[in-house]
Image (cartoon, rainbow, N blue to C red):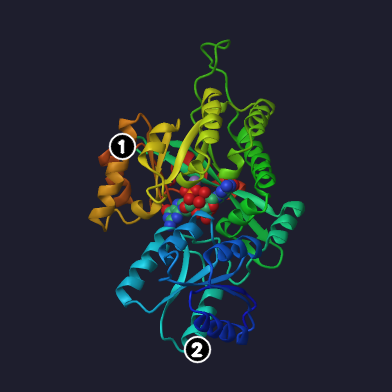
């Protein structure tokens, strides 16, 4: 039996009802609508675990709906259905993947109950695309689960190293949040960050992230005064800490002050902190973001545009907002040695970044050949499994000790 919640959008009521009956037969809770507006209302309120989406509808096409779902941070398993040919379905499927959606499969019409049941079952046991180690299958958290996790302190932070390409020196760490559920184990951030954003829990989550990460960072890399000029401001710190920020957080203008307070309290130089924003998150409220981001830059914090190449923003936003770093999405980096196209994207983004005076970071570096390619094209920083996975505090300590000993 499948205990999920299925939301169906199809302009044909007969098909919608058929899907409903089959899914209810599998034990699922089901809602069905022919209206995109109602579909999105329910999506927000009900957090479906599964979505079945008709690709061709009169008011809005399925590809637009996919884009909108991606923008809303959808983590549901998506099944795309349509009477159109296989190639179009394939293309729509790739489209969903590229938006980072979890596409479980395509359902060509007409379909058999068995085909649908198979897809619904598959959705229940799949991990989100692009997610590797942390995803635990089956459990689909709801807002209350996240609320409880925050209250019980079940979230913790892992740290992944960033390396200076030219010297292989340590450039810093990216803090990545994790949730260890007492029954369901490790849950990947894609499963609960969008949920936290939709249900006003993201500020609390960000606060907890800062508590953990700043305490660790301040203790591990205390900001040292410059020995030659003890009274002058110290050199910019050598090791940086990167933190991911959500769009919601950016609307909170107290945030800057709170972060500054914490830096002062934790004796952390603002120049050591890098805030990573996704293209989409920075775009949601361009005026407020511009103001807030500018204030943060004026305080000395660094800003990074994350997952570059995957969002929907225009080049204009990149130029307009005061970023100091551009992070090339891992989907291009990880395939760079295999794909001419990926190499072209990676190199163009590095060059674009440099021409705007930004540092370029490649994420998702998994082997030496990729690293050597990055070095050749002048990429500044690299991050990926090849240097180090996201690690717990104690694993980071071991990792650094090994590096100092010249083992790795
Ligand atoms: O390692 P990985 O599965 O950790 O991260 C998946 C996604 O979750 C990334 O896109 C990352 O930006 C996001 N993420 C990880 N930690 C945080 C966090 O503390 N806050 C926010 N807003 N996003 C995070
Ligand atoms: O915030 P962002 O979307 O950039 O989060 C980085 C994500 O990339 C995290 O989920 C992290 O676990 C993942 N990641 C980091 N290094 C690698 C890598 O070398 N390969 C792959 N596939 N994923 C990686
Ligand atoms: Mn990031």
For residue 160, above or below residue 5: above
| Residue 76 visible in the shown view | yes
Label 2, residues with CA under 10 Å away: few <14, some 14-19, many ≥20: few
Q: Which mark is nearer the camera, 1 or 2?
A: 2
Instruction: Please provide percent x and percent y for residue 185.
Output: 65, 64
Q: Is residue 380 left or right of residue 240?
A: left
Instruction: Please provide percent x and percent y for residue 243.
Output: 55, 41
Determine the residue positioned at 48% across, 29% down. Answer: 238
Determine the residue positioned at 48% across, 38% down. Answer: 404
Find numbered disc 2 in the image and state the secondary structure of the residue it sits on.
helix
Give the labeled residue for mark 1.
Answer: 352
* The one of 332 and 228 positioned closer to us in this rendering: 332
Determine the residue positioned at 34% across, 30% down. Answer: 356
* The one of 142 and 84 positioned closer to us in this rendering: 84
Q: Which mark is residue 113?
A: 2
Q: Quadrant of the N terminus?
A: bottom right
Find numbered disc 1 in the image and state the secondary structure of the residue it sits on.
helix
Q: Is label 1 within 8 A of ligand 2 (CB to nearest ligand atom)?
A: no
For residue 82, above or below residue 265: below
Tell which circle, 1 or 2, labels the residue nearer the N-terminal end: 2
- Marker count (numbered): 2
Instruction: Please provide percent x and percent y for residue 301.
Output: 53, 29
């Amino acid at each position: 039996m499948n205990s999920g919640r299925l939301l169906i959008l199809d302009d044909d009521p007969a098909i919608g009802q058929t899907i409903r009956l089959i899914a209810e037969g599998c034990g699922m809770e089901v809602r069905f609508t022919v209206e995109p507006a109602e579909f999105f209302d329910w999506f927000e309120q009900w957090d479906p675990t599964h979505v079945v989406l008709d690709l061709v509808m009169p008011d809005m096409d399925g590809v637009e709906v996919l884009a909108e779902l991606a923008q809303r941070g959808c983590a549901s398993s998506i099944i795309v259905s349509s009477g159109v040919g296989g190639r179009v379905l394939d293309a729509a499927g790739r489209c969903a993947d590229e938006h980072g959606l979890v596409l479980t499969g395509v359902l060509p019409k007409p379909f058999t109950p068995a085909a649908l049941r198979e897809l619904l079952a598959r959705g229940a046991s799949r991990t989100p695309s692009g997610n590797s180690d942390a995803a635990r299958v089956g459990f689909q958290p709801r807002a209350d689960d996240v609320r409880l996790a925050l209250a019980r302190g079940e979230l913790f932070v892992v740290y992944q190293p960033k390396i200076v390409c030219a010297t292989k020196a340590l450039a810093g760490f990216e803090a990545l949040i994790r949730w260890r559920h007492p029954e369901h184990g490790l849950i990947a951030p894609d499963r609960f960050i969008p949920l936290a954003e939709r249900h006003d829990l993201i500020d609390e989550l960000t606060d907890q992230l800062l508590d953990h990460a700043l305490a660790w960072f301040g203790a591990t890399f205390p900001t040292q005064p410059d020995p030659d000029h003890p009274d002058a401001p110290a050199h910019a710190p050598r090791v940086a800490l990167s933190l991911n920020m959500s769009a919601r957080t950016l609307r909170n203008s107290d945030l800057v002050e709170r972060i500054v307070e914490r830096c002062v309290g934790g004796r952390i130089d603002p120049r050591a902190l890098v805030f990573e924003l996704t293209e989409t998150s920075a775009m949601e409220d361009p005026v407020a973001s511009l103001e807030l981001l500018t204030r943060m830059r004026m305080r000395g914090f660094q800003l990074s545009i994350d997952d570059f190449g995957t969002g929907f923003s225009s080049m204009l936003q990149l130029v307009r907002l005061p970023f100091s770093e551009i992070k090339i999405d891992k989907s291009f980096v990880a395939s760079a040695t295999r794909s001419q196209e990926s190499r072209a994207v990676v190199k163009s983004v590095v060059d674009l970044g440099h021409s705007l005076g930004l540092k370029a970071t490649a994420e998702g570096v998994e082997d030496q050949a990729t690293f050597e390619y990055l070095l050749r094209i002048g990429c500044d920083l690299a991050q990926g499994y090849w240097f180090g996975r996201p690690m717990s505090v104690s694993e980071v300590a071991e990792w650094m000790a090994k590096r100092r000993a010249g083992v790795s």
